[in-house]
Image (spheres, rainbow, N blue to C red):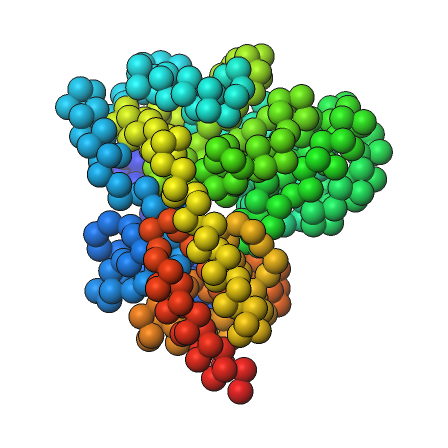
Amino acid sequence: MSARGAPRPKQPMPGAAQRLDERLRAELESLHAQSLYRQRRIVEGPQGAEITVNGQRLLNFSSNDYLGLAAHPALATAARRALDEYGTGSGAAHLVTGHTRAHHALEAELAEFVQRPQALLFSSGYLANLGIAGALAGRGDRVLEDRLNHASLLDAGLLCGARFSRYAHADAKALAARLQQTGKRKLAMTDGVFSMDGDLAPLPDMARVSAAAGAMLVVDDAHGFGVLGEHGRGTLEHFRLGLEEVPVLMATLGKALGSFGAFVAGSEALIETLIQKARTYIYTTAPPAAWAAATRAALKLLREESWRRGKLHVLIARLRAGAAQLDLPILESRTAIQPLMIGDAARALAVSKDLEARGILAVAIRPPTVPAGRARLRLTLTAAHSEAQVDQLLDALARVMKTVSD
Ligand SMILES: *Cc1c(COP(=O)(O)O)cnc(C)c1O
């Protein structure tokens, strides 16, 4: 009686999990068939010019560790000291109990370095971009973005509730035309250095047309910070643009700085607004204090060891000169990102595989990360590479590109 009266536990429809798997497998198969399936590599040990991947030692031309700091002992030492002082977990979000003196000091140092009144840490660049757009734009507003912006900026524009549109790549005139459209507030968002192409946004022109239209310009300098400008302050320093021209600067700490996370820098009112309103700042656990300590050590190296940036630019010039001699299809770029254009995704995979057999890691970048028909090897250089290693890459490319084009 009582057993009959008890509510039965709800069972899923028989075979529901199996049906889901069948559908997912069909989708995965289709990715395979289009050469768009992605696989992770298992890395052992530290980042560097050479890394061990799936048990094989490879020359690494695929990381964003542009200054060779990711495995620098000074960062690890700073992190270890902070672990002793603070422990591992931050315990809560920044606005609860997670914001330590180490985080606070890093914010002050970052603000000083980029010559802006204040800076605010985010747990990642992806979250920073979502936070900026969500705090500064919404219904009735307009967000305009470069067609080739990083996925996190595009998602930020799509998710913030504003009218969202994309303009032609690196085209300030196209932006100006879009800025004629109505909107309460207008936000123009762009990569400083485009992440898959390595070219620069025309920021001086963009700043001019944004100011004329009363729009806010937001620059994501993930790949310029630490690399461009006399002091490594990034794309804005390269173009000599300040707070007036670009009120919102975002940069990441997981690339040239060899650490993790991101920051936004701007006026006190901007930073206070983000603290009050950026949901991806408010509703997430603060990164560990040890991470903040390691990043402070990285920033110190960035300031004191300008030879890293100098060496990187020497290697970039060497690769470009060699590639020109070999007539390799390398895109126009003055940054650490030197894309070798292949086109077809299957072909890009084949070239990448051939290089791997020759001991070189150059990951193929395929749609949807890049437009269809624009698959490429995104070659990246770092200060940890030697000239001999760049020559080794050129040598391997000369052989592999010849066999692939036959
Ligand atoms: C890597 C990258 C991001 C994301 O930063 P994470 O800290 O890795 O989340 C954002 N914007 C651009 C342009 C990037 O290249």
Residue 118 appears in the rendering: yes
Residue at image location 76% in from the left, 26% down from the top: 211
- Residue in the foreground of this view, choosing between 331 and 121: 331
State the residue lying farthest toward the bottom: 406
- Residue in the foreground of this view, choosing between 370 and 134: 370
Residue at image location 55% in from the left, 12% down from the top: 268
Residue 280 appears in the rendering: no
Q: Is residue 280 above or below residue 351?
A: above
| x then y, percent, for residue 150 | 56, 45
State the residue lying farthest toward the left: 84
Residue at image location 46% in from the left, 53% down from the top: 314
Quadrant of the rendering where the N terminus is positioned: top left
| x then y, percent, for residue 393 | 40, 68
In terms of image quadrants, where is residue 22? Answer: bottom left
Q: Is residue 108 above or below residue 240?
A: above
Task: Tell me: 112 left or right of 324.
Answer: left
Could you tell me how many numbered marks the image carries?
A: 0
| x then y, percent, for residue 402 | 50, 82
Residue at image location 28% in from the left, 26% down from the top: 293
- Residue in the foreground of this view, choosing between 130 and 299: 299
Task: Tell me: 249 left or right of 203.
Answer: left
- Residue in the foreground of this view, choosing between 58 and 28: 58
In terms of image quadrants, where is residue 381? Answer: bottom left
| x then y, percent, for residue 40 | 34, 59
Task: Tell me: 117 left or right of 203.
Answer: left
Q: Is residue 305 above or below residue 40?
A: above
